[in-house]
Image: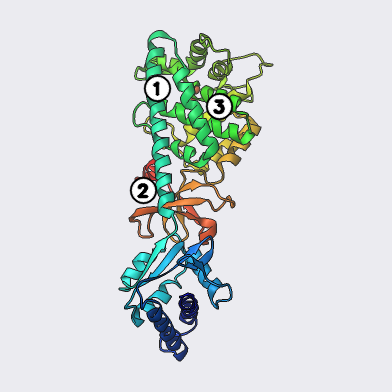
Amino acid sequence: MSGNADTVVTTLAAGRKANQLYPEQHPAFVEALDALVTAVSDATAAGPFRINVHQGRLYHESVVISEETPGLTSLEEAFESRRIESLTLHPGFTREEAVGLVHVLGLKPSTSLDIERELADRGIANATVAFLAEDEEQEERDRLREQDRALYNRLVSVLRTMSAQVAKAHHADLENASGLVGNIMRRLLEDQASVLGLATIKGQSETNLFHSINVMIYSLTLGASLGLPEEGMASLGLAGLMHDVGKVVFDPADPNQAQSMHVLHPTVGADILSRLPDDDKAPMLVAYEHHMHTDGAGFPDRPADYVTHPFSRMVAVANRYANLVDPGANREGLTPDRSIMQILDEAGTTLDPLFARLFAKAMGVFPVGCLVRLTDQTVGVVARASSDVMKPVVRLTYDAKGLELDDPHEVDLADEGLEILEVVEPESLNVEVSEKL
Ligand SMILES: [Fe+2]
Ligand SMILES: [Fe+2]
């Protein structure tokens, strides 16, 4: 039996090689393919014959294929790079199928290569493949995505209840919110890109609620890049979440109140938060100080030697970024990359120079949520950073013709030899970025 396996491996590897080197009519190709068909025919005499990969090694059933087998390494690599877990050959494997199979196994590996479809397109029924647990990985990612979105929605609803409480009684109970901030913080430390993906969610109404949560996420991103300990992160996150709490007592629909809301929300917010029994003063200070600029401008007025809390300066950066990408009131924001440029532009004037730069570094040149067109004209959303700042991992959503893909998938630009051609305005394609991540 193992003799069969060795021969199948050797002839299959030789067939792939012949496919690369010779045209189909070439005697060397014909000979290699004949040998493959014969080997498969012998191997499948007693029924289907399977070779499979386990941890980079090829096996026939549970027997490892000898390292001396010619062509073994090239076939192992061919399987691995295409995420093939096993290849099963069935009795009746024809010469046409052999030609198709070596051709398919020679197609350039990429995340868009669909081997099953390629085999089906060539009418190959007697060679079937199974793939490494990518489906399971995908399922796990989908599950976490649902879980993260549910967490985000719970936070929206807790914040909604709290805002109503504050508007009525000028008093808030932060306990539920703190618990959820803790959950988001732990998820962010586990998987920053996914949580940053959540911050691309925009509210059609209740924009303040979404703004608050997104400012919290950006604040935590900055905190994480500074390596703040968990307790500091929890306090910073809560401060980011509550920074605009003073707004809830105003009615923004009333033009007279809109102006007072803008000027007074820091004082009102600090007043609300000062009544909490909690001895963590950061949320109160951040509510009061988040519109104070580094150069002394901003509001409320303060003495020349007034020193703001570091969290206030961090939340100010997060708040500025959130307002740049999403100014609310149905106005169009800047794209994430241009928002980062703007943050850097304001480093040292309105914004703290160190925190502004650290934030830009944490977010990257093409932050998560950037809609980008690639050199092959496909379009996708930046899903996470990679080792090369110019080549992040992109979740492809549109093909080169601009048609929406029914199976959006991630490509690592560094691996695929692709580059970002331009950043696209989501409005120009009518895309809701948060739904694509
Ligand atoms: Fe504010
Ligand atoms: Fe704000």
Query: How far is mark 3 from mark 1, CA to CA?
Result: 21 Å
Task: From the top left corner, tell me how far across and down residue 301 is, in percent.
Answer: 59, 15
> Given this view, does label 2 or label 1 mark the residue nearer the observer?
1
Query: How far is mark 3 from mark 2, CA to CA?
Result: 31 Å
Where does label 1 land, which residue?
Answer: 158
- At horizontal 52% and vertical 46% (from top left) the residue drawn is 366
- Observer-nearest of 179 and 63: 63
Cβ atoms at labels 3 and 1 below 8 Å apart: no
Name which residue type carries label 1.
Answer: Val
> Given this view, does label 3 or label 2 mark the residue nearer the observer?
3
Residue 336 at least partly seen: yes
Q: Which of the marked residues, 3 or 1, is nearer the chain's N terminus?
A: 1
Helix or strand or loop: what does disc 1 sit on? helix
- At horizontal 44% and vertical 32% (from top left) the residue drawn is 327
Where does label 3 land, which residue?
Answer: 315
Q: Residues within 10 Å of mark 2 (few under 14, many from 20)?
A: few
Q: Which of the marked residues, 3 or 2, is nearer the chain's N terminus?
A: 3
- Observer-nearest of 430 and 50: 50
Cβ atoms at labels 3 and 2 below 8 Å apart: no
Specify the label residue 190 is tagged with.
none
In the picture shown, does residue 103 fall above or below 129? below
> Given this view, does label 3 or label 1 mark the residue nearer the observer?
1
Query: Looking at mark 2, is its residue's CB closer than 8 Å to ligand 2?
Result: no
Quadrant the N terminus occupies: bottom left
* Image quarter of residue 23: bottom left
